[in-house]
């Protein structure tokens, strides 16, 4: 093969790979890095929910077409731009027609990554339910081993409210096992650990603070209890 044909072949392969990437068909659950913005694509149904720290949200429901095109209304149409991680990016202009589906200062624009099946909402909640059942049966080691793996795997795909509440529950099994240092280490991965209520109130907007303070108080209580674990 001469150099011309070699370059032609490489060029064609590059064009083909780009075309395939642009035509990627997305299916399943996807989440933003903060864990609060979710998109579900099931066959031809597209559903997005984005929530801001101030409590405003976007709720976009539309038709998903092959090649990553979404049609929510005549004024709200956009394409999912493929990313290397298997997810996609949505880049809507500030005056997008999709703003009609959103509150103030919130948008579905951003990058989304695919969620492992075990971390999708229903599967995660079922795993937590199994943990609770084993815990109440005093099967503390089995309970911890079962759910700790799920929580560790899913941490990058859930919001911090969900993670911290689950971590607080998981810490109870470590307390019962007398593993105080491990219990403290687990709780140290939450945002409330080592903070005061005043610090959290200053840092988070009112809606977020109100949503979190109950879990924070439980984390503080469990941290003290773990310190007494023998």
Image: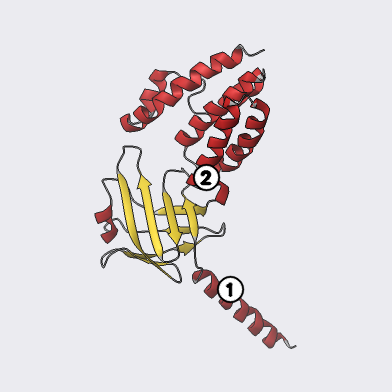
Picture coordinates of residue 118, whole percent (x, y): 57, 47
Colouring style? secondary structure
Q: Residue 8 got which mark? A: none
**Cα–Cα gap, marks 1 and 2:** 28 Å
In front: 158, or 107? 158
Residue appearing at x 41%, y 58% in the figure: 90
Q: Quadrant of residue 18?
A: bottom right
Under circle 2, the secondary element is helix
Under circle 1, the secondary element is helix
Residue appearing at x 49%, y 42% in the figure: 158
Q: Is residue 229 visible?
A: yes
Badge nearest the viewer, 1 or 2: 2
Chain-order first, disc 1 or disc 2: 1
Q: Quadrant of residue 60?
A: bottom left
Picture coordinates of residue 125, whole percent (x, y): 50, 40
Q: Quadrant of residue 109?
A: bottom left
In front: 200, or 142? 142
| Left or right side of 164 for 226 | right
Q: Pointer 2: what residue?
A: 157
Residue appearing at x 29%, y 58% in the figure: 98
Picture coordinates of residue 200, whole percent (x, y): 41, 24
- Around disc 2, counting alpha carbons within 10 Å, would you say few (fewer than 14), some (14 to 19), or many (20 or more)? many
Q: Residue 17 got which mark? A: 1
129 versus 116 height, above or below: above
173 versus 52 height, above or below: above
| Left or right side of 3 for 77 | left
Residue appearing at x 39%, y 60% in the figure: 46
| Left or right side of 73 for 28 | right
């Amino acid at each position: 093969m001469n150099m011309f044909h070699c370059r032609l072949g490489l060029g064609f392969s590059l064009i083909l790979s780009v075309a395939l990437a642009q035509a990627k068909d997305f299916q399943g659950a996807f989440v933003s890095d903060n864990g609060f913005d979710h998109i579900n694509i099931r066959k031809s149904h597209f559903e997005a929910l984005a929530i801001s720290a101030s409590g405003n949200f976007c709720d976009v429901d539309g038709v998903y077409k092959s090649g990553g095109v979404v049609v929510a209304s005549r004024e709200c149409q956009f394409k999912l731009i493929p990313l290397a991680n298997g997810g996609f990016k949505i880049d809507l202009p500030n005056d997008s027609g999709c703003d009609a589906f959103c509150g103030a200062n919130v948008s579905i624009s951003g990058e989304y990554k695919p969620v492992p099946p075990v971390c999708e909402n229903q599967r995660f909640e079922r795993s937590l339910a199994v943990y609770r059942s084993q815990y109440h049966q005093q099967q503390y080691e089995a309970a911890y081993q079962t759910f700790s793996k799920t929580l560790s795997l899913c941490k990058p795909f859930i919001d911090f409210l969900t993670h911290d509440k689950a971590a607080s529950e998981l810490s109870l099994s470590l307390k019962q096992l007398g593993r105080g240092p491990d219990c403290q280490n687990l709780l140290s991965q939450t945002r409330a650990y080592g903070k005061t209520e005043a610090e959290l109130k200053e840092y988070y907007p009112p809606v977020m603070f109100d949503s979190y303070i109950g879990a924070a108080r439980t984390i503080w209580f469990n941290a003290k209890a773990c310190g007494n674990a023998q």
